[in-house]
Image: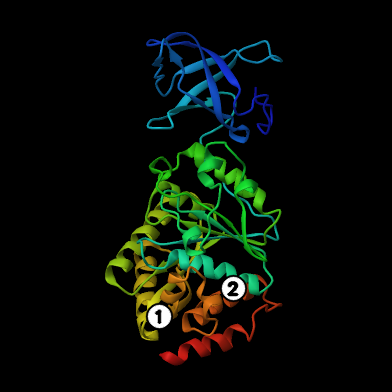
Amino acid sequence: MFSGNGKSCYWKVGDQLTFAVESGLFEGVFTSEIIGLNPQQGLIQIKYPMVDGRLVLLPVGTTVAVKENREIEQDVRFIVIERHSGENRSLVLKHTGLEFNHLVHITPPRHGQLICVCSGKGGVGKTALAVNLAYALAERDYNACIFDASLGTANVDVLLDLAPRYHLGHVITGKCGIMDVLTEVKPRVHVVPGCSGVQLLTELTVYEYNLLAEEMQRLFNYFDVIIVDTSTGITTGTTNFILAAQEGYLVTTPEPHAITDTYALLKTLVMQKARTVNLELVVNRVYYRSEAENTVEKLQFAAKKFLDYELGYAGFIFDDMRMREAHMQQKPVIEFEPSAQASQGIRAIADRHCQKHNPEQDKSQGGFLERIKQIGKRA
């Protein structure tokens, strides 16, 4: 059973759970294997029970009385809140004595920072910014972690030429913890790899998101900043991560369709009103400085007039052949070609971040204003 504070329980993954069901459709006692636990939220994920070789498809909303516990005599009541189909068939049970009507928000400690990198459209350079920003902050003595939340289409590992044994899919299914998937790519930079090609994980359930949120909270014991590379678009899993963050970078390009999708994501976030998030624009693949300025002007005007939202601006990155060459070599551009214009643009964004969080201590090399002057010469 779950303890009063909801942070511990007597079960573990792999245990057999026996429970009684009394409903209009089913009646009897069933046994199933536990495949996931979230004690903080009072949740247990189990395989579908089987009787005579057939699955027992308990409907959502069914109340069950758990019998299996050597130390507790009375029944413990749960309710079925989710059913998963496909290869990973499972039920999610919620303890009826614990509140579970809200998402867990990630709360960094005073010294920690949580940044999301998001975009309304794919192919605008979101992942490249997340990776290179982590490297730039590591140059400024930050311990940085890249959290690849692009589940189903993760590619941070591809961009960095990694072949991790475990990924977030294993964390969600309870096969391992967050520390087991943590991968060091260089001093001060680690990656929590996502997974690709698993359709089940392309849309996180509340249970799965809360499980990852609890696991992510542990990372702040080791890192100054966690950079979350979210999935593209306006899925619930994406917006949950963005709303959980203290701040974020909204990546777009000057193309009209990219601007439209960026506004759509921003509108979705603002309309939810669940938690305010401080988003700043990054305009990528810019040929001229005026392109970035025009893009920012359009989005800031629309955000203010139609959403009553003050959209910030973090900087721009020039379209740079060196960035493409770095991608082909599976390396961050700021290491592949430190003097490239794209590298300078990313470092300027990192400098701005450092000055915002440490106004009396500029960790940058050369200073934020000086770097802005340098990258502006092409305009």
Residue furthest to the bottom in view is: 377
Residue 91 vertical placement versus 361 (above, below): above
Can residue 9 be seen by looking at this rendering? Answer: yes
Residue type beneath disc 1: Met
Assess disc 2: are there few (<14), some (14-19) or many (≥20) residues with their C-alpha within 10 Å of its C-alpha: many
Residue found 50% across the figure and 75% down from its top = 333
Can residue 320 be seen by looking at this rendering? Answer: no
Location of residue 379 in the rendering, given as x and y in whole percent from the top left corner: 40, 90
Image quadrant in which you'd find residue 222:
bottom right
- Report if the CB atoms under discs 2 and 1 are less than 8 Å apart: no
Residue under numbered circle 2: 136
Residue under numbered circle 1: 321
Secondary structure of the residue carrying numbered label 1: helix
Secondary structure of the residue carrying numbered label 2: helix
Residue type beneath disc 2: Ala
Residue found 37% across the figure and 11% down from its top = 25
